[in-house]
Amino acid sequence: MTLRDALSRVDTIIVDTGGFQPEELPQVFRTVARELAAATGASVRVEPVPDPASPEPGTFHLGRQAGESGGEAQMEGSVEFKLNQEGAGYLMAEPVRLLFPFVTHLLRDRIDDDLSEAADGITVTPAFAWQRSTFDFFLTQEGRSQKDLDRDTYVRRLAESGFTHVEVNGLAFPAPWEPGSPGEAYPMFYTYCPALDQFVESDLGAGLYPSDYLSANLAYLKSNAELAREYGLVPGLLCFEPRNVPEEFFQRYPMLRGARVDHPFRSFQPRYNMTIAHPLVREHYGQMVERLLDEVPELGFLSVWTNDSGAGFEHTQSLYVGRNGGAYLIREWKTQEQIAEAAGGNALRYLRALRDAGRKKNPEFRVLTRMESFYGEHDVIWAGLEDGLEVEATSLVTRGWEMPYSHPRYPDSREFPGGSVYQQAFAPGEEELIDELEGRSSGAHFYFSAGPHWLFAPLVGIPYPGLVHARLKLLHRNGVNQLAQMGGTHPPEMVPFSPNHEILRAFQFDPDLDPASALRRIAVRWVGEDLAPVLQRAWGLTEEAILAFPHVSGLYSVYGFTWYRLWARPFVPNIEAIPLEERAYYQDFMCTTPHNPNNVDLSRDVLFQLTTAEKSRLVMERMDSGVWEPLDEAIEVLSEARVGATRSLGDGNAVEDLLVRLKAFRCWLMTQRNVAAWVAGVCGYMEAETDAGRGACREVVKEMITRELENAEALLELLDSGIEFMATTDKGETPLIHGQNLRGLVAKKMELMVAHRADEPYIDPDYMERQAGMSCEGEREPVWPVPEP
């Protein structure tokens, strides 16, 4: 007899209210009861059960484990499940956030298992105590404006996939309330990780933002928290803090001015936060935390990111304009060491204030922070981590943004996004630092991503389930207990088949699973026995291509692909040969200022050198020798099976869906390859000292243009496929997300590439300085003339 057979004999499900006041019964119990009722046809009752471990035949009890507190104190938690052949059984979990993902695991992954193990009763400990969505692309970040986004089904998929915690503080509007100067890029960054003062106000900060704006944002946060409650997820916050406030605040309170926190290249006006060294400001932050927990008492965490998007800690080394801040922390002529000690201590005092305010309402409230921005104060911050103060990181053994990890295929490269499936090693010393934090009742949350956002943006649904399993296994084997999952998950309406997240859930309750067997089970469920090998083969070949991808730049592999409009801008030998008004269709929507060299040079961004001609030649060689063969084979395998799959499964089946996504992935990879070719050809031409060298570079550019034109044609076909393979908004294009007009932009790109394909390669070496003489108040032409190539 199987579990399916035994569940069919359940006729009554009783939700045990024992241990709860009726109004305190977590909503997830009713949600799970509905799931089980739908699977069994049973009726549902909600009542106290004197002995939940001894059900009558045909009766299934659902409740909390006996003798448990119900709080976060039980770190890992567990699930108890028992079911016999008479349809008598129970499911008990502590904490209750494990209920919904376990039931999904039961009904999808184990439903056809032999009953014998469950008949004796099983206790399952999850692989990870926390699986937290971090920088949740669709729920709270720029993807919240995704066309036809259904937040209910999205949060449901989070829970189905094994997530236990979810960030809920997104803005209710596509754009933030942040005035700026003409031409600057900075206001758009306030859509990211919105600060506490975007939802509630303190006594000190009263009136800084419109009340209807705050009310709408708070309503959005609360509705997300309600969805989290429905599925048992613990809601929390991810904020860039301490963030700048409107300048009018400092007209009122000039002595509370803190640090300048803007990026001077991306912003055209200084932005300052309040000085957290002052007790009145710390009280301001504490009030906001308390007021948010008054609205949503179950908020369980606040993750603080800093030194970006208008946020930063006073006098820390990583502030964009250098160490600076208010008057209360540092007097003149201190050493770097003394400043670091004071700045680190000030940051810790602030984090403790947030934690203590939260714990007035929720005794288990935690505050987390990233360590990268504290490279100058690392030792001070690390020494102060304690109960309720935790860190999230790609690695604990490094300082700043450098990683002690190399690309698994190319040991000379560290260009890949940290925490992704390319991070396939675990450095010596990581485990010892994890143990050290746990010994102080603190903890470490390691970054991980199974898509979207943190790889291959703006694409969604790219499958690499085997690599997901390998990364999970690595982390679990080395003692990691908490995951910060960058990007969240995919909306099921956009990505109905998500093998990465299926593996995520299965691993959570069975870390010893055989990945090949698990993937076969998933494939059979989606396409049947005959076609399952097709999906499995395509997944494996896709992973070979992924591992062969050398990454032109880590920035272009993630959100930078959208920021810099790589699918909309023309790849031509001399971008400035196109008149500015003809470039406006894409350049006005780039995440750049008018003097950002990326406008005319794909190898650079602000003052960063993203790549070089030499590195780009190596990227081209590696892509051409390693990426296309496995990816094209995967596409061929799916193409051959497509007609049969459509005949047996209908349109939109898993074979057809994956075929479109892999073709889109090929377009994305080809554009990456052509970025490298552009840099190798155009930058190489500028560096060449001989006619022969310049001639060779022109051939590279010529071939690049041909390839990118063919690639654009392929992309246009996919945009008409009916499969949503990328994030887009119907609320108007922004620099952070593409709109519904991409088809027209690609056509315009092709037109300009054809018109300018024979131009001589050129990049103005003085572009940045020249553009700085351009007025941003209506005049589009710079004061300096454009030099002749």
Image (cartoon, rainbow, N blue to C red):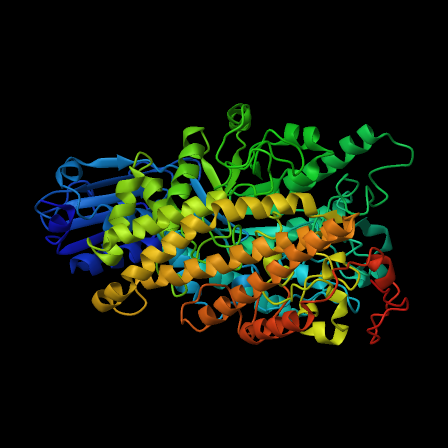
Q: What residue is shown at x 89% (from left), y 68% (from top)?
A: 785
Q: Nearer the viewer, residue 603 or 453?
A: 603
Q: Residue furthest front?
A: 692
Residue at 67% x, 60% y: name it.
190
Q: Nearer the viewer, residue 187 or 302?
A: 187
Q: Measured from the top left, where is residue 751 in percent x and y?
A: 62, 74
Nearest to the observer: residue 52 or residue 228:
228
Q: Position of residue 722 (x, y in %)?
A: 40, 72
- Image check: 703 left or right of 205? left
Q: Is residue 687 above or below residue 597?
A: above
Counting from the top left corner in percent of width and height, residue 175 is at 63, 68
**For residue 639, side relative to residue 718 (left or right):** left
For the N terminus, which image quadrant? top left
Q: How many marks?
A: 0
314 in relation to 458, above or below = above
Task: Name the spot of residue 203 as percent of width and height, x first.
Answer: 71, 58
Residue at 89 percent across and 36 percent down: it is 331
**Which quarter of the image is occupied by the C terminus?**
bottom right
Residue 645 vertical position relative to residue 297 in the rendered view, above or below: below
Residue 69 seen in the current view: yes
